[in-house]
Amino acid sequence: MEFTVIQAGLAPLTVTEMEGVIRTLDVFFQEARGEDPIRFIDIVETLRDDVGELDVTDLEWMAGCCALERRGIIRAHLLGGVLHFNESPCN
């Protein structure tokens, strides 16, 4: 695992749970291939039910997106002051 996300008062996800969040995001971006950048909050709202019983925080979703960006799978964009992500054109 590349990092641990901890928020005050919340138990962090386990390594296995965080890897599941990253896999969920990876599949989402593969299916969204070729689309315009997607607002981060729209990604979270779309995927919130796809992780079963896990209570994934926005910070953990962001950490998953950052992990995929570091791997070159997606790219982050600030458009109109709002964070967006989309597939990396290198893939």
Image (cartoon, rainbow, N blue to C red):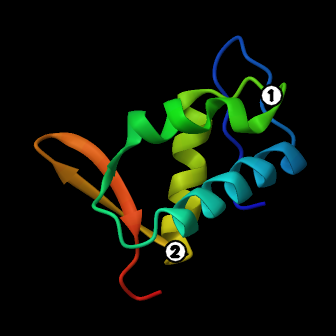
Q: Is residue 87 left or right of residue 20?
A: left
Please name the residue that numbered disc 1 is placed on.
54
Which kind of residue does numbered mark 1 sit on?
Leu
Vertical order, 91 against 81 (above or below): below
Give the image location of residue 71, x and y in percent.
56, 75
Picture quadrant of residue 48: top right
Give the image location of residue 26, x and y in percent.
62, 63
For label 2, the crowd category at 10 Å Cα-Cα, with few meaning under 14, some 14 to 19 and many 20 or more, is some
Which kind of residue does numbered mark 2 sit on?
Ile
Please name the residue that numbered disc 2 is placed on.
73
Which one is nearer the viewer's eye here, 5 or 85? 85
Q: In this view, does 72 lie to the left or right of 10?
A: left
Give the image location of residue 86, x and y in percent.
38, 63
Residue at horizontal 48%, vertical 67%? Answer: 69
Do we see residue 3 in this rendering? no
| Residue found farthest to the top | 9
Earlier-in-chain disc, 2 versus 1: 1
> Could you tell me which secondary element the residue under label 1 belongs to?
loop
